[in-house]
Each structure stands twice: as structure tokens, then as C-alpha cells.
Image (tube, rainbow, N blue to C red):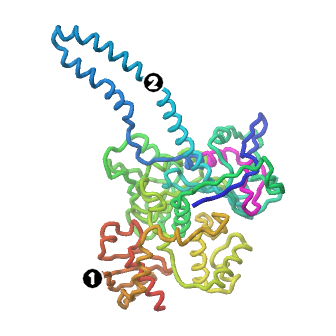
Amino acid sequence: MRFQYRYYGETYVSNSAASTDMRFVPDTLRAPTHFVADINKHIPFREAISALHDVVVADQRYQPKDKTAYKEWAAQNEEMMLAQFQARSSDLKEQLQPLQSEMRALQARKSKLMKPFYDAQSKYYNYLYQTNRELWIALDPVITVHPDRVFFECFSRDESSYASLSCSHNVFDHIGDFACGTTNIDYSESLYGEFQKIRDYKSTRLSIDPGGFQVKTADDPEFIEEKIDVPETWVRGFLQVSSAMNMVARRLDLHPMDVHNFCLQMRRKKERAGPRSIRFVLTPGEPVRAVFEPWNEEVVCRRSIYRGNVAEEVRVWGRRRLMLLERLIPVAQSFTVHLMGSGLPSFWIANMPDMQFTLGLSGWTANDWSHAGQFDLLAPRGEIDNDSKEKVFAALGKRWFATSAQLSLDTGLDRMMVERALTLYTQAGRVIYDLVNEVYRLRELARDPLPLDTLRFASPEEEEAQKLVALHAMSRHAVEAEADGSIRLSAQARHGDRQYQVMLRLDADERIVDGACQCNFFTYNRMHKGPCAHMLALRMSRQQAA
């Protein structure tokens, strides 16, 4: 998938003894988006923007040990070692010396002849490495300006971690004229060092520069155009994060020292065998307890009381990614954690004065967001006509951010219809759910509409479900009302020459919260990779019958 950017100039940070000026250059091919103001919370902003950079360059995938140099040395010395082993008698030693001298001369000659090749090879690999790093940074971050906030979004290089830095306008002084919208910015890794020079005693100015939009000549030499082939996984990951944010989750409020103790526990020990998880033991009215496996060492969060209604245990994998939050501990007032379930993603929010840093982690490090689970398939679905969808989007466009209840009043549509429309726009990358303020926000991820036909199916489950419904492979479903307001659906699915018993439980907002099936997909994955095709077909068939 190709994205095209055009920047007027380059992003830079200038530092002097009295001031810091951060000038971010936006994409001039997008709708004009700009914002200029002075920052009044220097240190929290510095730490938060630096943590955002740490996420951008993070890659915690397993890196096997590079044995290339050892293998080259072994190959070069194999004959010599063999000769030395055999030269145990005194008469052979005399014959070995001239051979060794000749071999050393040949090796020196070989090294001289091959040196240009090895140098070129090293430069090539370094070029690939640097190009790959700049590619990921070129994709990040995305900046959105709203009437009440400015927020930055990015993905890690391994696509398993998402980060968002949301700044209230209270963070800024002397706010000038600004234009709301979303834009990509020209960004490079060298800016990180300049961010570290932000100080309390220096004035700091943030500028999403409007200058590029005032230039009329597209052939101006200051214009920098980039055409980047963006991996579909990057785009799909953004869409999955947006969908996952609106799912049911267990909420924990942690003291910063609790997060410090988590990081300290991971720094003290290095696991060499599984399970490598944090097991949260949640008991209503009692302190949150975190058990670090495989050592089963418990960290009791005495300052953090669990306010939920049900006692349960939730496991979180890929825990070393929490070290990305470490530098925010001194400036955070508290941390809010949203746990979606064992083996499922989690969101960790660092609450700072008028700022929130959200770290979204996929189920585990090797399972990136684009493959972590089909969370858009767990969201409520239903038919809605195009006129109603456009009415909801237009109403959100006027407000820029709103709850579904507010949009229901604005449009006169039923709240369920509004939420269906918002779900579809979220899955299309045009709307994002603000987990902190619990509102929907307008955020156009791309300048042009995304090819949803390509991105729709990250796995074949939903496509297969649609085929099952079209073939009328689902028996008439039974509906049972649960005490907590959810409903339980059950039916039989005919798939080829097999029959599967399927169960699905939907909450009051029509979201999937539990399910079971006799198929292989559910047997091996449970709900960790989203619902199977038969569960989705059951929900689709119910909606058609409604």
C-alpha cells in the first residue's frame, strides 16, 4: 500500500540557552492542519515525547545470536587446526612450519583481495538497516489537532506496541490560530537528542508549522516528496487498536510506585523458561496482586485497590514492553490499566498533569497488532443505511469529539444505530475511540479512503462466516437471557460434512464477550485470536433474523 507525502522543508528542533523551538513539518497534501503554542509543562512533555520515541524505535522480537564472524573464523582456521592436531610427531612439525607460513601468506592475500567486497557488503547491510529504521520513523507519528487536545500516535517497529500522547490545551500558553485535523509529520531519529535539552528554565515552543500550506508553487525546491510502500500490517494494526479500545475490559488504577516495582522485578531477573507472564489476581475491595511467573514472586500493590465486582485472574504476556513506561514514573500521578483478558491486549495509561500517555500492548510481543486478534469482529455489528452513516459522521465532524449519546441527540437516530455507524468508521480508520475521555474523535488515518476490501480480512474467519450465512449453514438459533443483561445464543453449524455446536454470549451493547465451538480453530486458539467463523456466522444469522 503506497502513501505519498509532501513536506515543505524539514522538521527541526533548535536549542539555545533561553529557548527550545520545535517545528514539525506537516504533510501539505492533506487538509491544512496547524498548531502553534508555548509549552508550560516542560519536563512531563519532554519525558512523554521521549517515551513516544522509545516506542517508535522499539523492536523486542527475538534476535538470534549472530554467528557469522565465528563461522568465517572457523572456516579459515579449520585446515590449520587439523594440521596442528596431526602434527604431533617431531618430523611432521618441521614439514608443517613452511606449510603454515605459506597458508598465512595465502590468507593475507585472500583478505587483501576480498577486502573491497567485505567493505561493500558491510556498507550495504548498514544502508539496509538505516533505511529500515528511517522507513518506520517516516510512518510515525500521526498528529491530530482537536479543539480541546493535541495528540500524537505511533507504532513500534515490531508492530506489537501502540502509543498515544494526548495533550490538553491546558499544557500550552499563547495558543495562536490553529486548524483542526490529522496529518503526518516529517520526523527523524536525530530529533530525540534535541528533545532531551528541554528544560523548565527555557521557554519551549511547539509548532505544527502552517507555513507549507501558504506556499502556492508546488515546484518550490523546499518541497520534499516521499512515496513510501506502507506494509498493510501497519495500517491494519492501527484499525485493530481503534477497535480494541472500545471493548469491555477490567480497569485497574495503579500507583506509580507499583509500576516501578513491576519494572524493578523485571530488571532484577531474566527469565530462561516459561511462562513469562504477569498474573494479576483481582479481588474486589482488596489490593491488586501481580504474580511474576515462572518464579511466582508476588508484588502486592497496597496503594491500589481493585474496584471491580468479580474476583478473577488475568495473565499478561510480553511484559518487558512495560519498560517503555519507566521514564514516565517520576512525572506520572497515576496509571490506569485496561485488561481485556488473559492473552489479550492491554492498555496502560500514564496520567500526567493535563497529559495522558497510552501504551497499547498486543497479547504478546511476537503477536503483533495486525495478527493479535480480529477485534473489529468482536465489536457490535448491524445493518445501517448510508444516509444514517453520513449523518452521524457529519454530526461528529461539527463537534470533532462526542459520545454516542450526544450524537444520538444531534442526529435523532437511535443510540444503537449511532454506535453501529461509529464502529464502521472506526474500522475504516476515520474515527478513533478516546479511551481516556470515553468519547469518539474524528481522526482520518489516511488522506484517501483506505482499501477496505483489502484490509477487511486479516484472516479468513469473517469471509468464511459470510459464506456460511449465504449457504444457510446455521440452524435456527436459541436465545437465552442472562442475569447480567447479556444474551446467550446457541445453534448448530453445518460446515462441509461436519456439524458443530456453537455458543455465543453478547453483552447489552451486542459485543461478543464469550463463546465456544467444537471446531479446530476454537479448540487451538480459544478466544485469543478472536471468534471463529461459526461464531461470527451465528451472530450474522441472528442479525438477519432480527
Residue under the image location 64 percent in, 63 percent down = 446
Query: Which element type, helix, strand or loop, lies under badge 2?
Result: helix
Which of 424/42 is in front?
424
Which of 299/316 is in front?
316
Residue 324 vs 32, above or below: the answer is: above
Task: Give the magenta-colored segment's residue range.
Answer: 23-50
Residue 189 vs 453, above or below: the answer is: above
Mark nearest the camera among 2 and 1 is 2
- Residue 88: x %, y % from top left: 17, 14
Residue 314 vs 353, above or below: the answer is: below
Query: Which element type, helix, strand or loop, lies under badge 1?
Result: loop
Tag of residue 113: 2
Residue under the image location 68 percent in, 86 percent down = 412
- Circle 1 is placed at which residue position? 497
Which of 480/70 is in front?
70
- Residue 498: x %, y % from top left: 27, 81
Please check the rendered image and state whether residue 49 is part of the magenta-colored stretch, yes or no: yes
Going from N to C along the chain, the mark reached first, 2 or 1, is: 2
Residue under the image location 32 percent in, 17 percent down = 103
Q: CA distance from mark 2 to mark 1?
A: 66 Å
Q: Can residue 351 be seen in the rendering of this structure?
A: no
Q: Residues within 10 Å of mark 2 (few under 14, many from 20)?
A: few
Q: Please state if 242 lies on the left or on the right of 465 as rendered.
A: right
Residue under the image location 71 percent in, 39 percent down = 199
The three-letter amino acid code for the residue at tag 2 is Leu
Please check the rendered image and state whether residue 539 is part of the magenta-colored stretch, yes or no: no
Q: Please state if 105 lies on the left or on the right of 193 as rendered.
A: left
Q: Please state if 503 lies on the left or on the right of 249 as rendered.
A: left
Which quadrant is the N terminus positioned in? Answer: bottom right
- Residue 107: x %, y % from top left: 37, 20
Tag of residue 433: none
Quadrant of the rendered structure where residue 75 is?
A: top left
